[in-house]
Image (cartoon, helix red, strand yellow):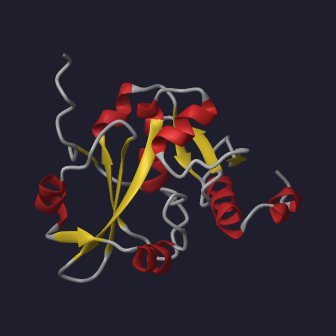
Amino acid sequence: MCGAELRTLPDGVQRVAAALQAKGHPHGPRMLDSSARTAQEAADALGIAVGQIAKSIIFRRKSDDAAVLVVTSGDRRVDEKKVDALVGKTGRADAEFVKARTGFTIGGVSPVAHATPPVTLIDRDLFRFDEIWAAAGHPNGVFPLRPQDLEALTGAPVVDVVQPPPAAA
């Protein structure tokens, strides 16, 4: 990429593309024809398993109002008690808080290029996959990476922060 092609992308996607390029990530953002606001929508658009979607969930830490980003597989649910044990008591983050802290709207929150760097946790279940896809700063924007790339790009610890998967029937 030389930079000219970034000008046609939405602002958030441009920030993500620049951050990925600055860190030497080999894949830039890709804009999908349909919305990828949910992990299921993204998986369907990409033709992959929903677990391969690295969903970004933002919480609000109560002690200092910091944003806490939890990146987990699209087929898992975050266990807030596990998150709280690692970072302190958290609460739900509303759309205004998410936009103000990250610079992204809900449904397009990237794990990189935040307006204010969040406290970040990566769930270890993402490492079940060789390739995952993350939001790229817009509800239609995504980019591919390996779980190890996510760890390197964010510098975040890999931890267990999800509820156990439902038992197979």
x 37%, y 74%: residue: 94
Most extreme residue toward the front, as rendered?
A: 169
In the rendered image, the residue lying farthest to the top is 169
| Horizontal side of residue 95 vs 89, given as left or right | right
At horizontal 60% and vertical 56% (from top left) the residue drawn is 139
User: Outermost residue toward the right?
Assistant: 4
Picture coordinates of residue 74, whole percent (x, y)? 40, 40
User: 2 or 8: which is nearer to us?
Assistant: 8
Q: Residue at x 49, y 41 (%)?
A: 149
Quadrant in the rendering for residue 2: bottom right
Residue 123 spot, x, y in % from top left: 30, 43
Number of numbered discs on residues:
0
**Residue toward you, 9 or 159:** 9
The image shows residue 35, relative to residue 66, as above or below, that is: above
Residue 14 position (above or below residue 1): below
Q: State whether residue 167 is above or below residue 98.
A: above
Q: Residue at x 43, y 71 (%)?
A: 117
- In the rendered image, residue 112, in percent from the top left (x then y), is placed at 52, 59
63, 96: nearer the viewer: 96
x, y percent for residue 5: 86, 56
Residue 83 placement, left or right of 29: left
Q: Nearer the viewer, residue 34 or 113?
A: 34
| In this view, 143 is above or below 109 | above
The image quadrant where one finds the C terminus is top left
Residue 59 placement, left or right of 108: left
